[in-house]
Amino acid sequence: QVQLVESGGGLVQPGGSLRLSCAASGSIFSINAMGWYRQAPGKQRELVAVLTSGRSNYADSVKGRFTISRDNAKNTVYLQMNNLGPEDTAVYYCHANVRSFRQVVNDYWGQGTQVTVSS
C-alpha cells in the first residue's frame, strides 16, 4: 500500500503564491508519474501538472504560473503556484502512479488540500 500526504494549502490573496508538497510512502519500487489535480465546487477534477519520465505537462490555464518539481530521493512532488487568482480556488489532489515491489502498478490519491484565493 502507498500513502500520499499533502501539505501547503491555505488562503492567499490574489497575486500571491503557495507551494504544495506531496510525500509518497509505503511499498514503492518506482514511481512512474506524480502530479497534481484540482477540483473546484461544481466542476470536474482536472489535471493541473504532471511529471512523467522527467517531463512536465501543465494545464493551459496554469502555464507560466505554476511549476512542478520532484525530489526523487524523498518521493516528494512539489507544486509552486505563483500569481494566483480566484479561478485557482479548488481542492488540490496529489496523484501518483506507483510500481510496487511485487511489480504491481496502481494509482494513488492524496486526501486533498484546499487552496483559496481571495481578498
Image: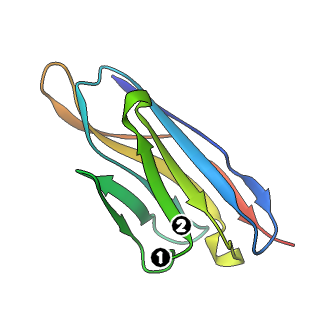
Amino acid type of the residue that numbered disc 1 sits on in the rendered structure? Lys
Looking at the image, residue 50 lies above or below residue 20: below
| Residue 116 visible at all | yes
Question: Which quadrant, please, contains the N terminus?
Answer: top left
Q: Secondary structure at mark 2?
A: strand
* Alpha carbons under labels 2 and 1: distance apart: 6 Å
Which residue lies under the disc numbered 2?
66
Residue for point 21% across, 25% down: 100
Looking at the image, residue 55 lies above or below residue 87: above
Dots 2, 1 in contact, CB < 8 A: yes
Q: Which disc is residue 4 wearing?
A: none
Left or right of 18, for residue 96: left
Residue for point 23% across, 31% down: 30
Residue for point 36% across, 26% down: 2
- Pointer 1: residues within 10 angstroms few (<14), some, or many (20+)? few
Looking at the image, residue 15 lies above or below residue 116: below
Which residue lies under the disc numbered 1?
63
Q: Secondary structure at mark 1?
A: loop
Q: Between residue 85 and residue 1, name the one nearer to us.
A: 85
Q: Between residue 48 and residue 110, name the one nearer to us.
A: 48
Left or right of 15, for residue 20: left
Q: Looking at the picture, how far across and down is residue 69, in whole percent?
A: 45, 51
Q: Looking at the picture, how far across and down is residue 84, in whole percent?
A: 68, 71
Q: Looking at the picture, how far across and down is residue 77, in whole percent?
A: 46, 44
